[in-house]
Each structure stands twice: as C-alpha cells, then as structure tokens.
C-alpha cells in the first residue's frame, strides 16, 4: 500500500488525457481543473514538458508503454526488467517511471508493453511487463500504483503482487465495439474487486458502457482530438474551425464524457 503521502480523492469517472502536443490542451487545462477530479499525463509527455504548468488537480501518471506499438519503438531487457526505447531514442525504464510518479502523481501505472495477438515477441513482452510490475510494486511509494494488464491476460500473477488497482489497456482500437468492452470489463471484474481503470476510452457511449460493466474510471484525449477536427459529440461539425471554436467544442466534449462517467450507484 502507498505510505505517508496525501490521500488523493478516490479515482472515479472519466479522466481527460493531456498531451500538450497541441495548443488546444493548453487552452482546455483551466476547464479540466473545473470539470474533472483528475487528469492523466504520460511519462514521455512529462519528459518533454519538464513538469512545467501542470493542471492543478491530482494527476495520474501513465508509463507511456502504449508507445511500444509505434513503428521504430524497441523493447530491451536490462537486469531482468523491460525498457522502452522510443522512436526518437528516448528511453523509458521502470525506474524513470517510478521517479516521475513519485514526483507528480497521486496514481501511477506499471510499465507494460501491449502485445496484440499478431505482434512478434508477444510472450516476451508479457514476461517483461510482469517483471516490471513485480519490481515497481515492491518499491516504497507515496502514491497508489495500479498494475497494467492487457485483454485476455490472467490477473493471478498481478493480484499476488497486491496492487492498489488494475488498469486495463488494449481496448482503444475496439472502443466502438460496446459488446467487447462489456465482456472485457466483466472478465476483469470477475477476478477482483480492486479499483479498475480502463485506458483509451473517451466517447460518451463507450465511457457509459465500461462504467456500467463495472469499471471505476477510464481516460482518453479524444475530447480534444475530436474538437481539433471541428466536431463535437452532440453532432456539431465546423470545418476550418477557429481556435476559440475548437476550444468550445472541446469543452462540450469534455462535459459529455464527464457526465457519461457519472453512472448512478
């Protein structure tokens, strides 16, 4: 269990992801602070940002392991742990992830390496993901630490490590398949009553689906990405939208996702 730090509000509902790759994220930050209890930032984004001008809400610090799916990314083994080498040459190690989470996070996620069924070296990715989780969950910490898992993985080896929660990834590509989302969340829920976070789910209907199936929380940058394309989830389409119009659409999308995450008990 985490020790000594300030107890953060319990993670619940929709969590916006801020990448700060686009001006829209900067403009949206004050509204995130008003509308959301938490925000998520990944370790690679923190590296580029240097910890400056972060939103004034408790932060979820994701490892950035999803970048293992990018062309040119490499996974290396070092002293029995998995290290991610990004396409630009930056390295993400479990130690770096733990340090960033300790500095900035109220909740962190272990460094895992997504492995779709058709990807080479899938078994090695799974083994290194578990090794990273085992190492991270043995370290002293002042934040809650969730074990990151992929669809179809047995939770047994992770639950033995006594994580503070489970984070389910790998569902963003099928976020429109509401039946699949329900099945995967129910599968995890059947194995544990720990807090359950689902990565990469932001459309209001998908948010509602995973919450009704038993997830406690989910995250996505899709409210901004959709607004950047001049669209809102209530059907507005604005070709060549001006910056202030994109911000308005992003606020509407953020409100819609947040409301969808408030599933009555």
Image (cartoon, rainbow, N blue to C red):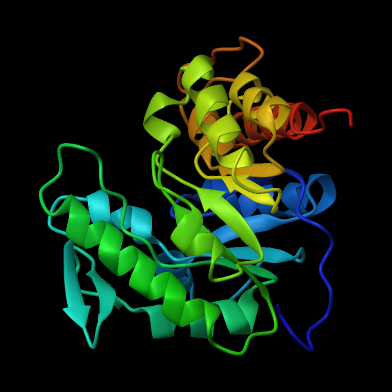
Query: Taking the image as drawn, is residue 242 in sight?
Result: no
Circle count: 0
Give the answer, above or below, for where 8 lies relative to 245: below
Query: Taking the image as drawn, is residue 101 in sight?
Result: yes
Q: Nearer the viewer, residue 99 or 112?
A: 112
Q: Residue furthest top?
A: 235
Residue at figure coordinates x 76%, y 32% from the top left: 255
Instruction: Left or right? Give the position of 46 relative to 193.
Output: left
Quadrant housing residue 141: bottom right
Tell me residue 252's x, y (percent).
71, 27
Tell me residue 181's x, y (percent).
52, 26
Instruction: Left or right? Give the position of 72 relative to 132.
Output: left
Tell me residue 53's x, y (percent).
63, 71
Q: Quadrant of the C terminus?
A: top right
Residue at figure coordinates x 60%, y 67% from the top left: 163
Quadrant housing residue 146: bottom right
Instruction: Left or right? Give the position of 5 relative to 47.
Output: right
Residue at figure coordinates x 58%, y 54% from the top left: 166
Tell me residue 56's x, y (percent).
76, 66
Residue at figure coordinates x 77%, y 47% from the top left: 12
Give the answer, above or below, for where 102 lies relative to 198: below
Instruction: Left or right? Give the position of 31 relative to 239.
Output: right
């Amino acid at each position: 269990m985490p020790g000594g730090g300030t107890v953060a509000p319990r993670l619940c509902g929709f969590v916006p992801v801020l990448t700060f790759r686009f001006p829209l994220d900067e403009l949206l930050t004050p509204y995130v602070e008003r509308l959301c209890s938490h925000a998520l930032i990944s370790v690679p984004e923190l590296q580029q940002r240097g910890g400056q001008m972060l939103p004034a809400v408790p932060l979820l610090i994701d490892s950035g392991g999803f970048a293992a799916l990018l062309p040119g990314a490499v996974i290396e083994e070092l002293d029995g742990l998995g290290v991610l080498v990004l396409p630009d040459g930056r390295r993400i190690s479990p130690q770096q992830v733990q340090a960033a989470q300790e500095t900035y996070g109220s909740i962190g996620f272990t460094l895992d390496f997504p492995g779709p069924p058709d990807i080479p070296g899938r078994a090695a990715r799974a083994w290194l993901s578990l090794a990273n989780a085992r190492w991270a969950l043995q370290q002293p910490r002042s934040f809650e630490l969730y074990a990151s898992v992929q669809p179809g993985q047995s939770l047994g080896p992770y639950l033995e490590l006594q994580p503070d929660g489970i984070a389910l990834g790998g569902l963003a590509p099928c976020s429109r398949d509401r039946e699949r989302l329900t099945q995967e969340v129910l599968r995890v829920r059947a194995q544990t009553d720990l807090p359950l976070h689902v990565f990469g789910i932001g459309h209001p209907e998908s948010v509602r689906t995973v919450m009704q199936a038993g997830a406690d929380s989910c995250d996505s940058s899709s409210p901004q990405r959709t607004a950047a394309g001049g669209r809102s989830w209530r059907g507005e389409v604005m070709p060549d939208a001006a910056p202030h119009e994109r911000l308005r659409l992003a606020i509407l999308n953020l409100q819609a996702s947040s409301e969808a995450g408030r599933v009555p008990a």
